[in-house]
Amino acid sequence: MSSSEPIASDSSPSNSSGLLLEHLGQVIEQAGGWISFEHFMHLALYEPGLGYYVAGARKFGAGGDFVTAPEISPLFGGCVAKQCAQWLEDVPAQILEFGAGSGALAAQVLNALQRMGRDDVRYSILEVSPDLRARQEQTLRTLVPQALDRVVWLEALPAEIHGIILANEVLDAMPVRLLHFDGAHVVERGVSMGANADLQWAHRPVDFSQIEQLRHMLSRVGWGEPNQWPAPYTFELPDMMSAWVNTVASHLRQGVMLLIDYGFPAAELYHPQRQGGTLMCHARHRAHPDPLILVGQQDITTHVNFTAVAELGLAAGLDLLGYATQANFLLNTGLIEQLSTMAEQAGAVQSLPYMRQAQAVQTLVTETEMGELFKVIALGRGMPDIAMGFLQGDRRHHLGLD
């Protein structure tokens, strides 16, 4: 994100936002006056025709609300392609990307693979947004027209997957449940409608099983009994992400899941000082913590629990093939070499294209930008544990696995 300045809550709603608020009011009324935050987040992001990701507004790039790594530099996709090329020696020439955004990563990977002599790779995209599907097709038609006949958009997850699965900044936008501890009680945080038809936070009690789920999770990261927990504290439980990892893993017969997102191991995510959680909203290159404004006009995200991702994969029979910061993954897969090649092609390091890419590389790898916060994890079935992206700086031991 380019700034952390807050967004004004009195921004004029779009027509689709007004319709979404009306729809939310009906859903909340039908549910008895309260819905979970997980339900609210799902509607705000994915309600057909109205949610943020499916309502047609531009999301990615300079003209959208945020910028992802593929929009920052094509070198990012070149590094992902290099890792894919290594894995493609052991699996069928197929890549499946979830939530392909603008299509930039797909275009970069296909272009880079072709330069490596791999023009046989078939590329599938599973995308829930019709608007983004259209944009992805236009991006690919513009940047890799020669590969378009090898790209397909899927309506559903294939029954069996043989090949490589890519998901860049997908897990962070999966709806989460919010539990809140006030020092005495654990409640679930949800959403209701106020007297002025405005959205507001509302709590309800949780049952014993939910408290035990939370207690078990926190015991894994060294927390004691509830009377020792910091308060107040808000916890994000990624039930939908867990279901997604379980489902995709169960369909993967041979190959790798490569997941790139921002987040932490569990011990860092549930840190005693992270009392407000990691919930964040993004609109017009500004970040703020209020999901109840600009509904349908802003992204809503939470940081990924990579310990949970690894545990889910292992429980599904996958092997953990690596876990690293984005910086280490990109450096391991030849980011600097790509930049040097670009300098040679440009004729001088003072050339404007080279200088722009050098600046982009800084954004991708420096600790204060994306290099440290973003992580890369690989889970595979029937694959050798020699992935080049994790040869230096592998942090599997940070995940706190048994």
Image (spheres, grey):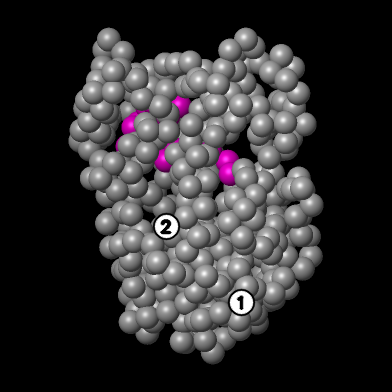
Which element carries disc 1, helix, strand or loop? helix
Q: Is residue 266 magenta?
A: no
Q: Is residue 297 visible?
A: no
**As drawn, 35 above or below 327:** above
How packed is label 2: few (under 14 Cα within 10 Å), some, or many (20 or more)? many
Q: Is residue 206 visible?
A: yes
Which element carries disc 2, helix, strand or loop? loop
Identity, as a three-letter code, of the amino acid under mark 2: Gly
**As drawn, 116 above or below 142:** below
Residue that carries the numbered disc 2 in the rendered image: 99
Read off the magenta span: 290-304
Residue 87 - label: 1
Corner quadrant of residue 232: top right
Rendering coords of residue 234 (x, y %): 58, 24
**As drawn, 224 above or below 150:** above
Rendering coords of residue 287 (x, y %): 50, 35
